[in-house]
Image (tube, helix red, strand yellow):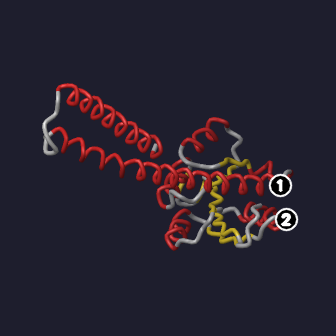
Amino acid sequence: MLENKQPVSILLIEDTPADARLLREALAEEQDAACELTHVTSVGAGLQRLAEGGIDLVLLDLILPDSEGIETLVKVRDRAPRVPIVVLTASDDDALALQALQRGAQDYLVKGYLQVYRHLLGRAIRYALERSRTDRLKDEFVSTVSHELRTPLATIKEFIAILADQLAGPLTPDQKEYLDIIQANVTRLTRMIDNLLDMAKI
């Protein structure tokens, strides 16, 4: 699954015993990494377990006793927005799969296929964890870069204000024109950084 010394902590939210057994068997066949599987049979119990922390990935059935459809995914996503979710369903529905991915699922697996191609589960988990790790690194990078850019920009703005107020001495018309150009470009760069952060959040 992942080349990691630590076991992957997986929360399975599945109410059908036969499907839960199939998933356990498929995970047991994975050789790349150890898994610690916690199994609950309702969204409510799953949300409680997620609130305790320590879960690396969720395997989620969309049809459960206390929740159905995409709303099931939304509830889990809202409780643990940083935990990757692999949706498991009996429905081979492209529209539903697309909707699940748009609402935050990392992958969408049809249970019937897993009966024949058990390796699909391990691959989906591996890819979901890797995509999640990449997303975290991207967020950290954007946050660090924006912070590192904002610090010198703040200093530049302060000195522009000092010069514009002529606290360091009078300005010639040419110097004032140059200062206005600097100010316009600093404002433009600030706007670009803000847009970058907004895009990263989206």
* Amino acid bearing label 2: Glu
In the image, is residue 21 above or below residue 129?
Answer: below
| Residue 115: x %, y % from top left | 83, 54
Q: On the rendered structure, is 167 left or right of 27?
A: left
Which quadrant of the figure has residue 190? top left
Q: Are marks 2 and 1 in contact (CB under 8 Å)?
A: yes
* Amino acid bearing label 1: His
SS class, disc 2? loop
Name the one closer to the observer, 139 or 107: 139
Name the one closer to the observer, 61 or 141: 141
Name the one closer to the observer, 44 or 83: 83
In the image, is residue 169 above or below residue 89?
Answer: above
Q: On the rendered structure, is 100 left or right of 187?
A: right
The residue singled out by tag 1 in the image is 119
Count the numbered circles shown. Answer: 2
Q: On the rendered structure, is 62 left or right of 117?
A: left
Q: Residue at x 62, y 35 (%)?
A: 95
| Residue 103: x %, y % from top left | 53, 45
In the image, is residue 132 above or below residue 174?
Answer: below
SS class, disc 1? helix
The residue singled out by tag 2 in the image is 29
Q: Residue at x 81, y 68 (%)?
A: 28
Q: If you read the primary sequence from the N terminus, does the residue marked by circle 2 or circle 1 appear first?
A: 2
How would you rate the neighbour count of disc 2 (Cα within 10 Å): few for under 14, some for 14-19, many for 20 or more? few
